[in-house]
Amino acid sequence: FLFDEAMQCSSGINSYWTPPKSQGFAPHYDDVDVFMLQLEGSKRWRVYPPPGPTDVLCRTSSPDYKPADMGKPLLDVWLRAGEVLYLPRGFIHQGITSAEEHSLHVTLSAFQTHTYADLAKRMMEYKLELVAKSDVAARRALPVGWLDCVGSSFNRTAMGPYAARLRDANSEGSDGDGDEAPAHAKALRRQIFAQVRAVVAKAAADVAAKDGIVDKGADLFATDVLARRQPPAEAAASDDAVHDAGEVEALDPATAELRLLARNACRIVVMADEV
């Protein structure tokens, strides 16, 4: 809980015991930032930089790499009891114990799906719902036949070398609208692209121009974070304070005293003009 509070995100904790002269896992990188605390024994850690630009601050964990494929490590250290090693997302690492002693370490992890992209995604979801409520065009059903003209298989640019095999059925042009496609399919494709772009543009314009939209998205994102921090039993019963064989005990405002354990134990939000 204290780590959650300090990092302002939902976190994880794991412990790992490794016998002497052993390697726990193959080289890999994680989708979380890790603080590794050595409790007993020691362990040799070799850390390598992210393999490529898309692996820096990665959003998903990597598959296992072969130790023989690893180049020169960026860091090669023995971590001993009481020492801490920080591993950002995307940095490949592998650890091995000495022949003389075992290793016990704990990892504290943070910042999984806790990025600007995730906050923006939550804001756009919120704003798209508002657009759908206010704009009847956004609520119209997708036209019958839309799956027959929209998708990667109907875009020769996206299909690359496979495009020729799909020539009889599919499309190209600026949006993949080719000469081989029937006129009605090309027209329907253009209509769908225009409608989707109009909805997205309307949502994005408000996100970019109005601070209130960012604040609303932040409230929703923070609510998600707080929900993930609760133990499952607490989350299931979060609507009521239940005691004494399931009976709800009412609190007397005149005598009840409440003390918040942490600054972020709760959060005030305004949704639909309600606090």
Image (spheres, rainbow, N blue to C red):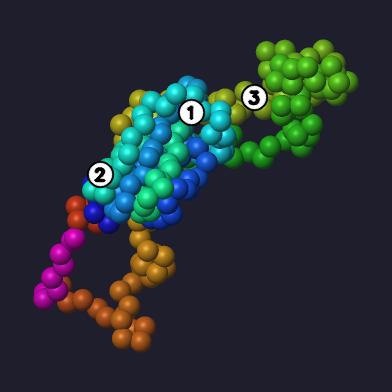
Q: Is residue 115 left or right of residue 141?
A: left
The vertical placement of 268 against 147, above or below, is below
Q: Position of residue 16 (x, y in %)?
A: 41, 54
The residue singled out by tag 2 in the image is 83
Q: Position of residue 11 (x, y in %)?
A: 35, 50
The residue singled out by tag 1 in the image is 55
**Is label 1 or label 3 in front?**
1
For marks 2 and 3, the one nearer the N-term is 2
Mark identifier at residue 210: none
Q: Name which residue lies at 47% across and 48% down.
A: 22
Residues drawn in magenta: 254-261
* Three-letter residue code for mark 3: Phe
* Three-letter residue code for mark 2: Glu
**Is label 2 or label 1 in front?**
2
Measure the C-alpha gap from mark 2 to mark 1. Answer: 27 Å
The residue singled out by tag 3 in the image is 193
Is residue 258 found inside the magenta-colored segment of the image?
Answer: yes
Does dot 1 land on a helix, a strand or a loop?
Answer: helix
For marks 2 and 1, the one nearer the N-term is 1
The residue sitting at the left extreme is 255
Whether residue 269 appears in this view of the structure is no
* Three-letter residue code for mark 1: Asp
